[in-house]
Amino acid sequence: MFEKEIEEYERIRQDYQQKIADRMGVKQWMEYNEILFSAHTCAIEGNSFTVDDTRILREQGMAMIPVGRSLLECMEMADHFRAFDYMVSHLDHPFDEALLKEVNRYVTEHTLSYRAPGAVAGEYTSEDMAAGDTIFGNHETLIARVPNLMASTQKALDDGQHPMVVAAKWHGYYEYLHPFRDGNGRTGRLLSNFILLRAKHPLVIIRLEDRDAYISALKQIRSEGTDEHLVAFFFRTAIHRMQDELSQKHKNSLPLLFF
């Protein structure tokens, strides 16, 4: 399954790596990804920061709060920067509960007290969860499944399964478990990209405009008992991003006519 998607993805990835990622250099490449990823992943959860707002905050810090943005949104974005930086600098960390909890701690460190007074950043929820129109299961039962999810995901990678397939499958099941009081979506998207970055693949950046399709693919795991829609969504998202940026590269390399 997914042989066709893997073939197309790998063909475009090779071109993308040579023409864009390698030519930007590691530092600039990661800064570009951090800003784009942070803007969209937080926007999916309701943050109003644009990509330009995110770039300004990343470059100038809390001393330059973009006009019209709340302090809470700034803190949320700053927390995501720290979580991203932690993830990138710890790609050799075992894919385990300690990694999961630490990423969630960074994601929610300065905002959790506003959204869930009494909850502890990086610790599992102590009550049952709901998000949007979804009621999750018994939280003790779901949390008890986390260690097996982390271990089976690492085994799938060790067995040579394609990183994109593993990242998508992990993400779908993790969101089903929803083990933290807040930040599950952002934590899940970060750890999916941890899998990809460790395999030296580009990040999957789910854009705000694709939120409905993304949520629908997650819901189909429950309604249809299959994660194939989410895996296909991950491939489409990754391929579309690479194609779009390759197209930008080509267009912006053409000579301009001044007169």
Image (cartoon, rainbow, N blue to C red):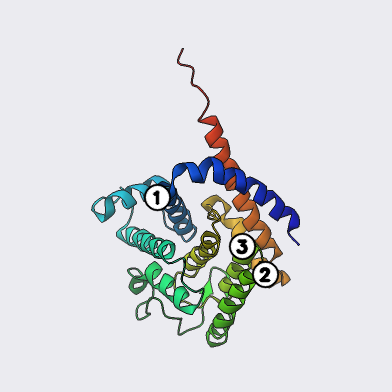
Q: Nearer the viewer, mark 3 or mark 2?
A: 3
Q: CA distance from mark 3 to mark 1?
A: 23 Å
Badge 3 marks a residue whose secondary structure is helix
Name the residue located 46 percent from the left edge and 51 percent from the top edge.
Answer: 33
Residue lying at 71% horizontally and 69% vertically, measured from the top left: 226
Q: Residues within 10 Å of mark 2 (few under 14, many from 20)?
A: some
The residue nearer to you, when weighing 251 against 178, is 251
Among numbered discs 3 and 2, the one appearing first in the sequence: 3
Q: Picture quarter containing residue 167? A: bottom right
Left or right: residue 253 compared with residue 240: left
What crowding class fits label 3: few (fewer than 14 Cα within 10 Å), some (14-19), or many (20 or more)?
A: many
In the picture, the quarter occupied by the N terminus is bottom right
- The disc labelled 1 sits on which kind of residue? Lys
Q: Which residue is mark 2?
A: 221
Q: Nearer the viewer, residue 101 or 160?
A: 160
Q: Nearer the viewer, mark 2 or mark 1?
A: 1
Neighbourhood count class around disc 1 (C-alpha, 10 Å): few under 14, some 14–19, many 20 upward: few
Mark 3–mark 2 Cα distance, whole angstroms, equals 19 Å
Q: Is residue 65 above or below residue 137?
A: above
Asked where in the image residue 42 lies, by quadrant, the reply is bottom left
Compute the Cα span from label 2 to label 1: 37 Å
| Numbered circle sitting on residue 258 | none
Q: Which residue is mark 1?
A: 27
State the residue at coordinates (35%, 68%). 111
33 w.r.t. 160: above or below: above
Task: For mark 2, give the secondary structure.
Answer: helix
Residue 182 or 244: which is nearer the viewer? 244
- Look at 53% across and 83% down and name the residue there: 143
Q: Is residue 123 above or below residue 115?
A: below
Q: Which x, y percent locates residue 87? A: 43, 65
x and y percent of residue 24 in the render? Answer: 45, 43
